[in-house]
Amino acid sequence: MVLYTSPFPNSFLSVLHSFSWGLIFPCYWLADRLVGSFVPTTYEKRQRADDPCYFHALCIIITTPIYLALLVASLPFALIGFLLWSPLQSARRPYIYSRLKDKNHANGATLLTEWKAAGSGKSFCFGSANVCLLPDSLARFNNVFNTQARAKEIGRRIRNGASRPQIKIYIDSPTNTSISAASFSSLVSPQAGDNRTVNAGIKRTTSMEYKGENCGSNNGEESREDKGGSGEPHEGEENTCIVRINGEENGHMSDAEADTVNGQARASGPAEPSLEGDAEVSKTPNHKQKEGDSGSLDSCSASRESLVKVRVGDGTVDQSTVNNKLLYKASIMKKTSVRKKKHTDETFDHEISAFFPANLDFLCLQEVFDKRAAEKLKEQLHHYFEYIVYDVGVYSCHSCCSFKFVNSGLLFASRYPVMDAAYHCYPNGRGMDSLASKGALFLKVQVGSTPQDQRIVGYISCTHLQAIAGDTTVRCEQLDMLQDWLSEFRKSTSSSSTANPEELVAFDVLCGDLNFDNCSSEDKLEQQHSLFTHYKDPCRVGPGEDKPWAIGTLLDPEGLYDEEVCTPDNLQKVLESEEGRKGYLVYPTSKNHGSSQKGRKASLKGNGRRIDYMLYTEEGLYLEWKVEVEEFSFITQLAGLTDHLPVAMRLVVSTGEDDP
């Protein structure tokens, strides 16, 4: 299958489309600005409350007539542009495939050789997030704004989090000798204050700056310029540092060890300032870094915690030597005493993390509706992901029964080569959702090859279902179509037979914003859908019941800019406590309770509405291989930038001692 690298089959149609959109854009931009000026966010309301001169109100009074006059003047040109733009959509392709052009920093081909070296198998990490990149006037209804700046910052945070060095944790304790979650965390540290107990609870990842060697750089453009053509490791390469923590029995640290930690923190030099300052990003409150804010790894503020003892390779690295190396961000893993694992028989690690997982392989995003924001996001993600599929969907009346003003909002990024891609639009959208070409994106990626030159492939599906509450029947129909389309895609892209397999399927993952949770009484039909008999949900016990450690992924928009949750570290700490979750997560609805959000929270089970899913299946994979979940994470790194929590899952594909 040929991947589409441009939206139209020839340059003439592309130029004509650009011309028509150029006629439409002034009217679109003015309307967006005009509506947005009357839909303030809570952050803007707080700022205006402190304005004794009512300066903003005066600006609105002055600019509104100007916007209206310009809007009326631009309408004739927009109408002409629309008459040209609409018919062109019948020739438009359903997505744009972008591959990193700089071959010096492309590593997709190198990753394919890792499977042979792995021998017994390999792990793959998947991430999913709803980023709410709507036109600014519409995004404000979700209490977020400045879409263009948010897109750039979201891309920067994702790539910085994913390109962190992978650090393995060893805890020397009479009662705990296991390796802690290597890919999600970096350092083990006691809790702040007097509580020095390392509990067996859910892990929490916070931040600090440290300097170490044998690790890849976090700052994309700047580090590349410094490296030039030296051939040093670049972003995304797996570089492992090892940290060993010595503790007393029951996980307590001695006073001497605690003093050593504090002494090293005081002895460490000041952090280097960020090299990626951006005036546009500073327009929104989400990008103002505070003390301890680690959401963006470019922050110049360091955490109060520090290293205990670092061992890189076989030698112990002296603190003064470490401080003279390249600057990196690492995460500090903490065993929090607030939430404990209730099910000790859980087969995989799970945590609330302030970072996207290190060495993230695949990323699926939803609600990337704004085209200009999609370009900015793509530009940032390309510093880490070599392959990106974006601008997915259809416009006008093409292939769908109703007129579509915006695309599907889906975006896919991968470190591995994309072999095939297909998109389908849901024809049964209702209300406001019918104006967007919501649908499903199906992808086939190559992740390796066997010594017999058999391709090792994986399937990933990304979707966004009907959002309007109460449209249970619509969502169930969309889930039915999703399964049928996925089955058709696998059949049409398979080049193997049972007798002579040319390809070996390693995994099949489905993720996205499904807009229903597993605890609401109004979502019972979706909870019992046949999709969950074929795909496994790591957070789910059964219909209507989630695992105790699973939390909601839908944030209460009214609290996005509160001091307690406006940074990744702060949001992480809040979500670790039950009271914190009740204050800042949207909880399941119930027919037996009133409409008051706070009234429902005290009586309903669950830890919030979990509407963002990561599912996997063992059906249709190579028979001799086994797929297991290694880690699952709820991520707070996009705090203040979106009203959803991203989720991540790491799968391990076990092949045995020998390759097939």
Image (cartoon, grey):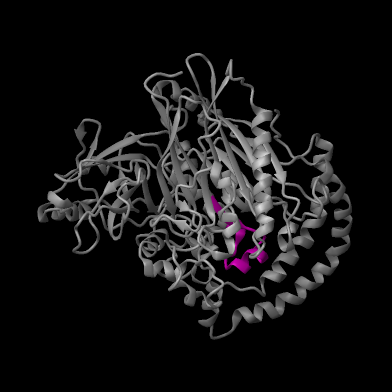
**Left or right of 51 on screen, residue 373:** right
Front residue of 145 and 389: 389
**For residue 217, above or below residue 78:** above
State the residue at coordinates (24%, 59%).
191
Q: Quadrant of residue 339?
A: bottom left
**Left or right of 613 on screen, residue 312:** left
Residue 120 place in picture, x, y as percent: 38, 24
Visible in this render: residue 381?
no
Front residue of 318 and 387: 387
State the residue at coordinates (58%, 44%).
379
**Left or right of 464 on screen, residue 226:** left
Residue 489 place in picture, x, y as percent: 67, 34
State the residue at coordinates (39%, 68%).
580
**Left or right of 300 on screen, residue 268:** left
Residue 300 place in picture, x, y as percent: 38, 55
**For residue 421, above or below residue 655:** below
Residue range highlighted in magenta: 129-149
Q: Of all residues shown, which one is farthest toward the bottom?
A: 52
Q: How many marks?
A: 0
Q: Of all residues shown, which one is farthest toward the top?
A: 452
Is 422 inside the magenta-drawn segment?
Answer: no
**For residue 340, above or below residue 126:** below
Residue 362 place in picture, x, y as percent: 52, 40
